Image (tube, grey):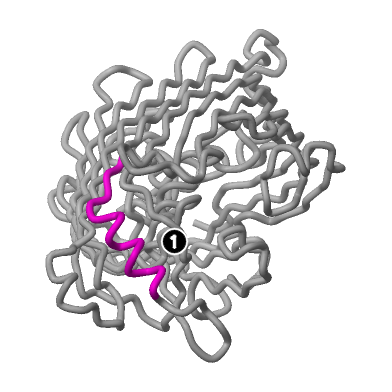
Amino acid sequence: MTKNILLLGLLSCSFATNAIAQDECCKEKKSDKTECSVQKTKKPSALSRFSIGGYGEAVMSRNFFSQHFNRDPATYKNDDSHGRFDLPHVTLNLGYDFGHGWTMGTEIEFEHGGTENAVEIDADESGEYEAETERGGEVALEQFWINKAFWGGKFNIKAGEIIIPVGEINAYHMPNDFFSVYRSEGEAKMLPNTWHQVGISLWGRISDWRYEAIFTSGLDAERFGHNCYVHYGATSPYEYKLGNVYAGAARIDNYSIPGVRLSLSGYYGYTFKNTERKASASYDKVHGALAIGSFGLEMKRWNWIVRGNATYSHLADAQKMTTFMNAYPKHTQQDGSPSKHSPIASNAYSVGLEAGYNIFSQISSLSDKQKLYLFGRYEDYNTYAAGRQKVAYKYDRVKRMAVGVNYSPIRQVTIKGEYSNRFLSHGYNNEPSVSLGITYAGWFLK
């Protein structure tokens, strides 16, 4: 294994979270195959086997709409604008190459600069203050895995806390993997993000094809809700993640066309009864089977970057599970459940497309040193696209448009600015905003 690949599959191109992005990095740099393959070579010192990296985002926004939890279109139409400052994601990544095809990777993430404990005003509970705990502990260990490579990286076995690469935003969640100041909303809202769970993965790359298959625990239906769908299903209020039910995920990427990646990913698993509470016999045939399918693409050619995604999901037994969850007492300090106590949709979807052009490519003195992308993005998503089920939350259908710039003075740093507007269905007030951000993604030591 060479110095350029101490971590198999940990961050994308500039800092590969997983081997998908690492493969792209190799293609973009046109590196010799031995540089990006898994090789058994001698290292001069233990330090040369060790790597440190990370990525981070600091952002500010001015939202020109009401910050009240209730989106009533008449009452809050003329509310003042409000601003927000945030550190959405800051990570520290550590890796080690043990040799003989064995590698280790970890990612410690600080979300919103805090401890993953927060007080929020919950729209599902009539605006009450609610303490939210996404996961026990003060920081989130998003990745911890051991990988064994065989046959020059064509086949690998990875086990531990790993990324579930379903959808584009999970496989490519680095700040230099999307143009917008915040991660693209649709997939990030309906799916766990970044989706990581304990499991085992079989993956590799053969010619222009990369494959991955994962076995892990099912999601927790107690954490589902109308305006988040299954987003919180991978989290746990306990010090451990229950595994009463199981799930599988798979992804395949193709790089046959120069500068183009085409991807398919999917997920299937049960979600009901993945809790310490026991359901009555009337729920014996309720499983809450969750099926997700996603298509993604990326093109980097002719000074353009174009990215797209289309993700659709179906959740069986949604109405019965809603009835079961709403029967729980609401969460208090002493008793209750972490249930959202809101209807769960049987269907959800997200489609999105963004394109950016590097205008510095037309300036010879800047084309090799700096980049300035002008971009536009459009997405349409619905976390309560419930089919024949009565739609009670019409504002969960969102169409969003954004335009902005990405300026990279050096490869690892990007300054972002964008104007965006959410267009809500059925007469609800639109939600325009202006956002600025600065990001980094790279290695500190490798």
Dividing the picture into quarters, in which one does residue 30 lie? Answer: top left
Rendered view: 397 above or below 308: below
Q: Secondary structure at mark 1?
A: loop
Rendered view: 94 above or below 238: above
Q: Which residues are magenta?
A: 313-327
At which x and y percent is residue 268? Answer: 20, 52
Dividing the picture into quarters, in which one does residue 20 lie? Answer: top left
Q: How many marks?
A: 1
Residue 173 appears in the rendering: yes
Dividing the picture into quarters, in which one does residue 210 lie? Answer: top left
At which x and y percent is residue 367? Answer: 64, 17
At which x and y percent is residue 343? Answer: 42, 56
* Residue beneath disc 1: 232
Q: Nearer the viewer, residue 74 or 434?
A: 74
Residue 188 appears in the rendering: no
Instruction: Write the residue at 55% across / 28% down.
Output: 399
